[in-house]
Image (cartoon, coloured by chain):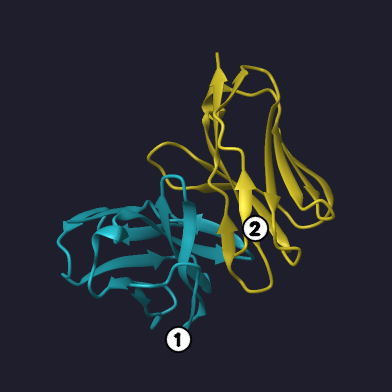
């Protein structure tokens, strides 16, 4: 069973702070890594993808990947109340399947 | 507008009554997938399709069927629904591993 683990939270940060979300995965053959945001009652939407070790920045979002430690993280800088959502980590390997974590609930307090 | 559509959005049915949830995408994506989302279990992949007439089982395929006769459509079939299939279902299509999700179908099986 290929697993993707996330801390379910809830994680609360004040507005303007950095939110740090973490994810570990069990399959060393995993090649593609994704962060999705899901607002309550809505469908997941892709916010970041990362494929190689290191950091990838997109606006206020930075994804970090460490394949040796089987660890991927998402940093949200200058957090806004509109960032309050559940963040899903997803992993894909050579088998074209996707595995999702159970999500981390983030609340940004104004 | 590029989108993935699902129908119906809400469905209440009874055990054993065959049903089909339709999924359609207008982005010419080759990859399509079905997921179910349950509290505490996250998103789990049911079936996926790499292209027309090519389908593969995901993590939780038992009790479900799919078909891919056309590139744009990927229906999910429950031949004999049971209460443990009560869930929120998402269809997704993908280009280059980046998935776009439909709005979801909330299914209740009594």
Q: Which residue lies most toward the bottom here? A: B53
Residue A91's mark?
Answer: 2
Residue B53 or residue A106, whichever sits in front: A106
| Chain hosting mark 2 | A
- Chain B colour is cyan
Picture quadrant of residue B18? bottom left
Q: Position of residue A100 (x, y in %)?
A: 56, 54
- Density class for disc 1 (Cα within 10 Å; few <14, some 14-19, many ≥20) is few
Residue B66 or residue B13, whichever sits in front: B13
The C terminus of chain A lies in quadrant: top right
Picture quadrant of residue A106? top right
Residue A37's mark?
Answer: none
Marks 1 and 2 sit apart, C-alpha to C-alpha, by 25 Å
| Residue at 40%, 80% in the rendered image | B70
Residue A57 higher or lower than B100, as above or below: above
- Note the chain letter of the yellow one: A
- Density class for disc 2 (Cα within 10 Å; few <14, some 14-19, many ≥20) is many
Residue B39 higher or lower than B50, as above or below: above
Question: Same chain for the residues at labels 1 and 2, yes or no?
Answer: no
Residue B19 or residue A2, whichever sits in front: A2
Secondary element at tag 1: loop
Q: Position of residue A80 (x, y in %)?
A: 59, 23
Q: Which residue lies most toward the front here? A: A1
């Amino acid at each position: 069973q290929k697993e993707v683990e996330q801390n379910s939270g809830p994680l609360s940060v004040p507005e303007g702070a950095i939110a740090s979300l973490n994810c570990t995965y069990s399959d060393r053959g995993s090649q593609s890594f994704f962060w999705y945001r899901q607002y309550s009652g809505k469908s997941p939407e892709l916010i970041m993808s990362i494929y190689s070790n290191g950091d990838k920045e997109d606006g206020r979002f930075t994804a970090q990947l460490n394949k040796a430690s089987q660890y991927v993280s998402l940093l949200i800088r200058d957090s806004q109340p509109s960032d309050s959502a559940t963040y899903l980590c997803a992993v894909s390997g050579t088998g074209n399947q996707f595995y999702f974590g159970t999500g981390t609930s983030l609340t940004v307090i104004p | 507008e590029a989108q993935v559509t699902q129908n119906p959005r809400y469905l209440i049915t009874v055990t054993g009554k065959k049903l089909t949830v339709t999924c359609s995408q207008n982005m010419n994506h080759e990859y399509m997938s079905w997921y179910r989302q349950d509290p505490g279990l996250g998103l789990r992949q049911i079936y996926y399709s790499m292209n027309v007439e090519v389908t593969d089982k995901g993590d939780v395929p038992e009790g479900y069927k799919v078909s891919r006769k056309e590139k744009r459509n990927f229906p999910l079939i429950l031949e004999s629904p049971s209460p443990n299939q009560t869930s929120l279902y998402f269809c997704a299509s993908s280009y280059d591993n980046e998935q776009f999700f439909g709005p979801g179908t909330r299914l209740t099986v009594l």
